[in-house]
Image (cartoon, helix red, strand yellow):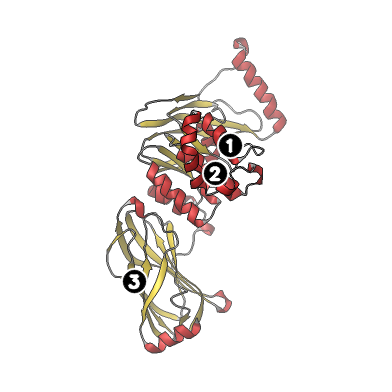
Amino acid sequence: MIKSHSGASSDVLIRAENVGKIFCRDLKKSLLYGLKDCACELLPFASRKKDSHRSLRKDEFWANQGISFQLRRGECLGLIGHNGAGKTTLLRMLNGLIKPDEGSIEIKGRVGAIIALGAGFNPILTGRENIYVNASIIGLSKSEIDSKIDEIIDFAEIREFIDSPVQSYSSGMQVRLGFAVATVMEPDVLILDEVLAVGDLAFRTKCLLKISSMLSKAAVIFVSHSQEQVQRICTQGILLKKGVSIFSGPVKDCFKAYHETLPPSEIFKISHHDDTILSAELTCSKERHRSGEDLSMRLSYKMDASFRLRIHVMMVRDESGTTVATVDLMPCLHLLNQGDTSLEFSIRALSLKPGTYTFLIETIAEEHARTLLRKEFALSLKVFGSLTYWSSYTPKAEIKELSTKEQLNKFLYAI
């Protein structure tokens, strides 16, 4: 059962209690079961006994089962899990696209949602016409839409094509338009499913900043396979496995639980030290960092032989072990020389969510893609600052100095 209330709402905007959904693997049986269920609802004498955990018929399975949570205004819930865990099915029930087979869902206020690419758009209508149709569905009057339409078009950055049929839009253009309609209309509840999987980096950053700015006025449910994106905007999470919630709590704890469910073959080897690297040390200029400011670091190697590098990156990992930023060190150093090499560099505008972070270096030689180093350093950085700084995904590292003039000449020659 789904209830929706408009107008003023309390802090709790979404309440789901013991929600479950059953699907059937066989199409013909699914249609037959559907007819029988309709008869059960319409004909009292034909109704079958309902209970909270009814037995499954042949070829049926639980896509979701026993899911309960509540979400308040100002909170962002991340749904986490493998493909097929039941995330999209749950979102479709929350959005009213399909009906739960058990439990209840109560939603207060106006709902904006992007569940699938192009969903809700008529391909024959123009972008402008689809804006009016979609905005009307969520309850806006024509005058309200008129006052917002320029803002929607500007946010989507498709003014040149706004009067063209949506069927001529690329996937990125459809996402831009869908996201603009869903967010600019200022819904009380915003539901997003992999909306940032398509589109360029600048627009994804723009979308995340928009979501952050909406959190004080709305409740957001967010699904993404990018742990970095989920970590940046979500305040809590639900870990789904085969349609069942196996963990619910702070999003960083959700990812800890998620990593524990991974098979050993999917877990990266955190520490590997090739014999040619005698030592490696990473130091930071400070222990506390304000998000959005530059951060200076020093990386020192002691090598038994010289190697040209194929990959040289530093990964920033949060408390759950999730990589939230990757810094490309190749522009700073292409060559590891025999003996001592010390590099001081600055990460420009390192933007991270407040918390504690560690650093992992991965160094791979050009010849035979030999892994020289993959090591998480016992170096922690406490980050503080405003949400407005969460905008940098690929921070830039700039060289400050090498240990010797000879090494600097070698570095410049290597470039």
Q: Are marks 1 and 2 in contact (CB under 8 Å)?
A: yes
Q: Are marks 2 and 3 in contact (CB under 8 Å)?
A: no
What amino acid is at disc 2? Leu
Task: State the residue at coordinates (61%, 16%).
Answer: 40
Q: Secondary structure at mark 3?
A: strand
Q: Secondary structure at mark 2?
A: helix
Instruction: Examine the rendered structure and indicate whether residue 195 appears above or below residue 290.
Output: above
Q: Is residue 383 something one can see in this rendering?
A: yes
Quarter of the image where one finds residue 30: top right
Instruction: Examine the rendered structure and indicate whether residue 271 appears above or below residue 250.
Output: below
Which residue occupies the extreme left position in the image? 287
Residue 275 place in picture, x, y as percent: 46, 79
Pick whichever of labels 2 and 3 is earlier in the sequence: 2
Q: CA distance from mark 1 to mark 2?
A: 9 Å
Residue 354 place in picture, x, y as percent: 32, 54
Pick whichever of labels 3 and 1 is earlier in the sequence: 1
Disc marking residue 297 = 3
What amino acid is at disc 1? Asn
Quarter of the image where one finds residue 77: top left
Residue 292 place in picture, x, y as percent: 34, 59
Q: Secondary structure at mark 1?
A: helix
Pick whichever of labels 1 and 2 is earlier in the sequence: 1
Q: Residues within 10 Å of mark 1 (few under 14, many from 20)?
A: many
Residue 64 placement, left or right of 15: right
Tag 2 residue: 177
